[in-house]
């Protein structure tokens, strides 16, 4: 009987230990790099900005680690709001963004996004204002973004619509790792309401037509993106071989085109 009890205790100990390790080290943990950090105005909190890669012109997923400076403990419950600001020589303006959810995700970070609509340069740069509400304590950290680069194959462009005069900002999110065959394709579309407001455009239609300019052919079985919420449009694109692809897109509002000759280049 004692041996049986020992085996049961060992089995339970192994089970709970394994579960704790699995919770601490999920198999799909994201590798992140630290971009910058700053203390909040009051000095109560430290906010660190992390990302999967160097920040670029386009849609960037952002991750925030927030700690209490008093004891360096991590904040696990908070409301977090973002405001990206571009400081130019003659003016300032904002950009499209998505606020994190109110609680941390399974990786222990608050996850949001910013669409940087232009790269930075030595004289003009981005700042990210991060407002936090932790158990009723409200504070703000001002993060100076070291650099936003311009990619060789752009992931964002803007177009002024002849239909309504609005400037639309179109970002390509997926495929981030293209491969031969059917790939998910995803765009976000925002428009400039004012220099400080860039709402999601949720009532547009998008059609896609991929082609290989160097080979003179396209591909079948593509699925036009449809709106799934918050300005995100998802569909399917078929790449039949590796190489340079151009995904031609048409964005329309009530059947009227927003812009002409729109495309993203994807090479893999």
Image (cartoon, rainbow, N blue to C red):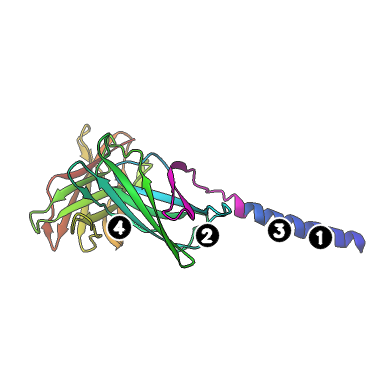
Q: Residues within 10 Å of mark 2 (few under 14, many from 20)?
A: some
N-terminal of the pair, mark 3 or mark 1, is 1
Q: On the image, numbered disc 2 is attached to which residue? A: 76
Numbered disc 1: secondary structure: helix
The residue shown at (22%, 48%) is: 92
- Disc 4 to disc 2, how far (Cα)? 28 Å
Q: What is the x, y in percent for residue 27?
A: 56, 48
Circles 3 and 1 in contact, beta carbons < 8 Å: no
* Real-space CA distance between mark 1 and mark 4, rounded to the nearest whole angstrom: 51 Å
Q: Which mark is residue 9?
A: 1
Q: CA distance from mark 3 to mark 1?
A: 11 Å
Q: Is residue 51 visible?
A: no
Mark 4 and 2 residues: CB-CB less than 8 Å, in contact?
A: no
Residue 217 to residue 183: above or below? above
Tags 3 and 4 touching, CB below 8 Å: no
Image point 47% across, 43% down: which residue?
Answer: 32
Frontmost residue, 175 versus 192: 192
Magenta-tinted stretch: 23-50
At 33% across and 38% down in the image, what residue appears?
Answer: 147
Decide which of 211, 96 is in the foreground and name it. Answer: 96
Q: Nearer the viewer, mark 4 or mark 2?
A: 2
The residue that mark 3 highlights is 16
Residue that numbered label 4 is attached to: 232
Relative height, residue 266 to residue 195 (above, below): above
Instruction: Tell which residue pokes out farthest to the top in this image.
Output: 214
Q: Is residue 167 left or right of residue 114?
A: left
**Front one among 11 and 85:** 85
Q: Residue at x 52, y 48 (%)?
A: 29
């Amino acid at each position: 009987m004692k041996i049986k009890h020992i085996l049961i205790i060992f089995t339970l100990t192994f089970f709970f230990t394994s579960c704790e390790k699995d919770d601490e080290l999920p198999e799909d943990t994201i590798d992140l790099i630290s971009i910058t950090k700053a203390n909040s105005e009051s000095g109560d909190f430290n906010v660190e900005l992390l990302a999967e890669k160097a920040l670029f012109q386009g849609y960037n997923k952002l991750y925030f680690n927030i700690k209490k400076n008093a004891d360096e403990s991590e904040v696990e419950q908070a409301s977090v709001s973002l405001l990206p600001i571009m400081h130019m020589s003659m003016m300032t303006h904002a950009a499209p963004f998505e606020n994190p959810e109110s609680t941390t995700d399974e990786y222990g970070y608050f996850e949001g996004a910013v669409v940087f609509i232009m790269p930075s340069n030595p004289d003009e740069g981005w700042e990210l204002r991060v407002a936090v509400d932790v158990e009723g304590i409200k504070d703000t950290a001002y993060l100076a973004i070291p650099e936003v680069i311009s990619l060789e194959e752009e992931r964002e462009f803007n177009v002024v619509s002849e239909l309504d005069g609005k400037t639309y900002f179109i970002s390509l999110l997926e495929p981030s790792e293209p491969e031969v065959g059917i790939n998910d394709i995803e765009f976000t579309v925002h428009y400039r309401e004012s220099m400080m407001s860039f709402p999601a455009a949720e009532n547009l239609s998008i059609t896609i037509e991929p082609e290989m300019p160097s080979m003179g052919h396209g591909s079948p079985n593509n699925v036009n993106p449809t709106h799934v919420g918050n300005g995100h449009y998802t569909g399917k694109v078929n790449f039949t071989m590796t190489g340079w692809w151009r995904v031609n897109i048409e964005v329309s509002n009530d059947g009227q085109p927003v812009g002409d000759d729109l495309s993203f280049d994807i090479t893999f």
